[in-house]
Image (tube, helix red, strand yellow):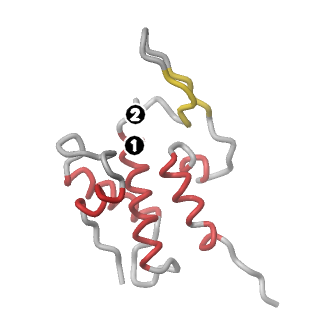
Amino acid sequence: MIVEFSPAKFRLTFPGAFPEPEYPDLSLHASFNRAAMQIDNTAGSEIPVDPREMILYLATAHIETIGRRDPNMVGQIVSAGQGSTNISISAPVAIGSEAWWLQTSYGQEAWQSTAPYRSFLWVE
């Protein structure tokens, strides 16, 4: 079974964070499809449907949030100002794909939620 994306359910999951028309349904669908490139959303996925839906929604929120940034800005925002505009970014201390996930709170939660499915046990 696969998770079907619902913009209405997505917006209810993150109240006020992704309002229309600033975040149109088409954009959210595209980000969900990109999220499914990172999180297996096929019938054979190791992640059960219930947690997979939330993980995919978190990944979608992560992709939408990153997509609104300056494309040259990579990392986690650690502080921001308004007068004369300033922003401080810290590169996450992580290895591999974890660094990409740690750029937003949504990505951090998705990364943590996938931990049981990224681990394995050696059996001899």
How crowded pointer 1 is (Cα within 10 Å; few <14, some 14-19, many 20+) is rated as some
Which residue type carries mark 2? Arg
Q: Quadrant of the C terminus?
A: bottom right
Question: In the figure, is residue 102 to the left or right of 73?
Answer: right
The residue lying furthest to the left in this view is 21
Disc 2, SS: loop
User: Mark 1 = which residue?
Assistant: 65
Estimate the x, y position of residue 69 in percent, counting from the top left.
Answer: 40, 33
User: Mark 2 = which residue?
Assistant: 69
Name which quarter of the figure residue 8 lies in.
bottom left
How crowded pointer 2 is (Cα within 10 Å; few <14, some 14-19, many 20+) is rated as few
Say if 114 sits above or below 81 in the image. Answer: below
Question: In the figure, is residue 76 to the left or right of 34?
Answer: right
Name which quarter of the figure residue 42 lies in.
bottom left
Disc 1, SS: helix
The residue lying furthest to the bottom in this view is 124
